[in-house]
Amino acid sequence: MSEDRLSARKKQILKAIVDAHIAYGEPVGSKYLASDKQLTCSSATIRNEMAELEAMGYLEQPHTSAGRVPSELGYRFYVDSLLQRYSMTVGEIERINLNLRHKLSELDQILSEASRLASNLTNYTAIAVKPRQSAVAVTRFECVRLGEHDLILVLLFGSTVKTKNVHLPAALPESAQTLLLAALNESLVGVTVEQINIQRIMELERRMGEYAFAVDPVIKAVYAVIRELDGGDLKVEGLNHLLEYPEYADVGRLQRLLGSIENKDDILNLIPTDASSDDVNIYIGNEDGPDGMQKSAFVYRTVKDGDRVVGAIGVIGPCRMDYSKVIATVNQLAEDVNEMLNLSEPKKIEGPKE
Amino acid sequence: MSEDRLSARKKQILKAIVDAHIAYGEPVGSKYLASDKQLTCSSATIRNEMAELEAMGYLEQPHTSAGRVPSELGYRFYVDSLLQRYSMTVGEIERINLNLRHKLSELDQILSEASRLASNLTNYTAIAVKPRQSAVAVTRFECVRLGEHDLILVLLFGSTVKTKNVHLPAALPESAQTLLLAALNESLVGVTVEQINIQRIMELERRMGEYAFAVDPVIKAVYAVIRELDGGDLKVEGLNHLLEYPEYADVGRLQRLLGSIENKDDILNLIPTDASSDDVNIYIGNEDGPDGMQKSAFVYRTVKDGDRVVGAIGVIGPCRMDYSKVIATVNQLAEDVNEMLNLSEPKKIEGPKE
DNA sequence: TTTAGCACTCTTTCGCTTCAAGTGCTAAAT
DNA sequence: ATTTAGCACTTGAAGCGAAAGAGTGCTAAA
């Protein structure tokens, strides 16, 4: 692609077209640009430039007698090089801070709250993503006794806590419970789900001796929690905003997009889980991508707990989107969430107590 | 309303009209009914009856030269007295059972899974509701020590478990932790959130003596958990199915419905939280109800844990809905969920161990 | 190199007619 | 006393062509 050199005027025109299209949602013509804008040349000149921009792939024409519309490449160029980023006012930043800081709590809630805010502030649909975690391992086991046959297994994963009720087929005295806990903490801490093999399970059963019956339900519970944890999840806020934009009046497209959102995979796959850039990413749907995302854009930023990507928040909407505002909002929100996660954190986890 | 007496023939005609409208989605006329159906009279007779049914409020006419469409009252009458309920085949029941029983786990997950199934089986949008709980009280406190300044508070509410990370402003030795737990279990078990007043808090602080600093963050955590728990929640599955029905091609109506769903209150308020009937309920949207639910119907059944309503699953869609199938599915699913909850339950919770 | 002007293309819109569906009513038939 | 056939009437939907409007590309002049 020859993105490298575009004359200053071409850039100016391209930007003006994208701006106008974003603002009004309709194809924009040469006449309008000549009149209303700070372009000094005439409509004919603009027409020539537009023809060239179209040839280069930055613009598209719905039909011969319509104005031009930015192509996917056009949007890409716009967000990558033409967009000057919106800087939030102190007031706006404070509003975000205040709302978010108000209730600090677990990751899930922080993320949902952040996406709710993102939706309210931008008037687009927002998404909170918990990406699939590969190789999660328990860092510590604890348990709470409910009765002879029942206990709550508490699993710590770094600073995340998950619990699971476990029902045992026979009575487990309190002493055996400590035994179980010790066995678990020694055999399964730091072990990923793939590494839990028959050897380890037999080892556990051996250690538990006459109480080996407890191993099976406990392992099942561990599996269930880990599966739940690394499954990836996605919450949507402000879906109705989608309907405000005429590009989704086409039921077909809306349906495909909803399909992508509900199916989750299309969107989960967009989020890189390895330690990735700390900046806002912008995905612009194209023919190669998932079907539902065509003509839609997804502005997101990942959220990290230390080095690990634990989530992302983002805004989804038509390609024609108020990028500067959306980018600024998503950025600020992710920033704040990051800060909360890395401050309010319990400093360091103790090793298992013996 | 004079629902009491409708001639047999009127009932027959009304049923035929609703059936046909449900099947094809268009106003139905006298001619069609006379030809295709098991009605023995002529179109003229039917016209007369239809005029009367309209006068009585069971039917509506979009415009003079269109056929009739059931009114809200018409649907009501249909589901209440004309509908013969669909009885599921063994195969269908088994499919539900199999899918559901496969992964038994916590309430939230069971409900989501059930609603996912409901959506798949009926091809409508399904909803899992956790209604607002009034007067939730902790039945037991436990905690897991993470470090000198950090612990995980485990709160049991009947058979529901919630955890919360608590960060303490100063070091709490292990001995004080047992003290804290005892204090909590004695002062706050069985106490609803409204009953947690300054006296109780001071009492706690007194008991904790030099470790009184721990009370504030713990109380905050308890509040947070309870608020989260009684907040009510709602998950939606298969939203895209809504778009399959022409009644939601009107973006306005779709938007209002989505608004109602996202806002949650409109739907939460429909679910009775007191011990209510064990049967499927059908809400049919009317002018009095929430704006978003107009021309939509909501078929749901509550799910109970013992006597307490802990959730509901339901299907939402146009008034013109395949009621027999939807009712049967929702009913069976709720039945199964109920069964799972009341079997897989740990029998009875022990009192706090001392 | 830019611009004015103009012919050309294509969609949108409007008014018009026609069509078809379905009713309500009247008068005849059972 | 009901039921039915027949018919006039109403009204939205569908089809069609003309006119309007928007925007382009191209040519020729500045």
Image (cartoon, coloured by chain):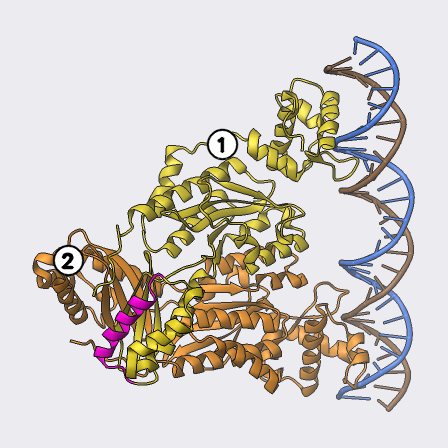
Chain colours: A yellow, B orange, C brown, D blue
Q: Is residue B167 above or below residue D27?
A: below
Question: Which disc is residue A218 wearing?
Answer: none
Residue at image coords 68%, 87% = B8
Q: Amino acid at mark 2?
A: Leu
Residue at image coords 46%, 78% = B337
Question: Which disc is residue B172 wearing?
Answer: 2
Label 1 Cα crowd, 10 Å radius (few <14 / some 14-19 / many 20+) = few
Q: Amino acid at mark 1?
A: Arg
Label 2 sits on a secondary structure element that is: loop
Tell me: B90 left or right of B335.
right
Label 1 sits on a secondary structure element that is: loop
Q: Is residue A178 magenta?
A: yes
Q: Is residue B97 above or below residue B264?
A: below
Q: Quadrant of the N terminus of chain B?
A: bottom right
Residue under pointer 1: A85
Residue at image coords 29%, 78% = A208
- Of all chains, the one bearing label 2 is B
Residue at image coords 48%, 40% = A280
| Picture quadrant where residue A16 is located | top right
For the record, the magenta segment spans: A171-190
| Image x and y of residue B325, in percent | 61, 78
| Image x and y of residue A228, in percent | 44, 65
Label 2 Cα crowd, 10 Å radius (few <14 / some 14-19 / many 20+) = many
Q: Is residue A307 above or below residue B244?
A: above
Q: Is residue B219 magenta?
A: no
Q: Quadrant of the C terminus of chain B?
A: bottom left
